[in-house]
Image (cartoon, rainbow, N blue to C red):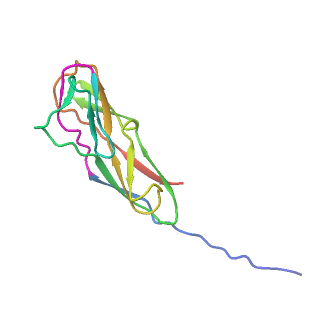
């Protein structure tokens, strides 16, 4: 009779955690016609001058930041919904996160601990009522 042994092993990865560090604050704007407003993932503000203008005296724009803690020996993907509905009473706006881009600080690879910044872009018809519009931006991370 012949025999041999095989070693059995398993690697347990630390769970991924996602923690919001800062909320997405698009700032204050004045809408007087059709156009767009964007706060890019790197914090750059772009507006359609003359129709959608950032209001300097208003709230300072700030990207949302999320801290991700993950095992350094494994890679993971980050996902944010492309469109987020912002509401003010019965009125809605669509915030596009995909057009503004994600910024992964600390490198381009997604492994180990990272901070991810999320911005957004809104296209206006020029007829939107004044108000404070709010919604929820959800970021998910999962091992590959």
Task: Give me the residue at 40% from left, 37% from top.
Answer: 98
Q: Classify residue 10 as left or right of residue 85.
A: right
Quadrant containing the N terminus in the rendered view: bottom right
- Any magenta on residue 141? no
Task: Give me the residue at 51% from left, 58% from top.
Answer: 75
Counting every numbered tag in the picture gives: 0
Q: Classify residue 108 as left or right of residue 100.
A: right
- Quadrant of residue 59 within the rendered picture: top left
Q: Position of residue 48 (x, y in %)?
A: 26, 27
**Boundaries of the magenta span:** 22-34
Q: Position of residue 115 (x, y in %)?
A: 35, 56
Q: Is residue 3 above or below residue 128?
A: below
Q: Classify residue 52 as left or right of residue 105.
A: left
Quadrant containing the C terminus in the rendered view: bottom right
Q: Is residue 108 above or below residue 2?
A: above
Task: Give me the residue at 30% from left, 51% from top.
Answer: 65
Looking at the image, the residue that sits furthest to the left is 57
Predominant SS along the magenta part: loop
Q: Position of residue 79 (x, y in %)?
A: 44, 45
Task: Give me the residue at 56% from left, 69% from top.
Answer: 11
Q: Position of residue 104 (x, y in %)?
A: 39, 52
């Amino acid at each position: 009779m012949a025999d041999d042994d095989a070693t059995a092993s398993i690697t347990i990865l630390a769970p991924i955690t996602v923690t919001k560090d800062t909320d997405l604050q698009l700032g204050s704007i004045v809408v007087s016609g059709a156009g767009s407003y964007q706060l890019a993932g790197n914090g750059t503000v772009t507006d359609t001058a003359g129709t959608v203008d950032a209001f300097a005296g208003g709230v300072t724009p700030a990207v949302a930041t999320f801290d991700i803690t993950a095992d350094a020996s494994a890679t993971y993907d980050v996902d944010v919904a492309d469109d987020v509905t912002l509401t003010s009473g019965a009125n809605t706006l669509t915030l596009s996160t995909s057009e503004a881009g994600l910024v992964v600080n600390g490198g381009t690879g997604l492994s180990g601990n990272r901070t991810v910044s999320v911005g957004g872009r809104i296209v206006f018809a020029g007829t939107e009522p004044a108000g404070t519009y709010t919604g929820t931006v959800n970021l998910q991370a999962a091992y590959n």
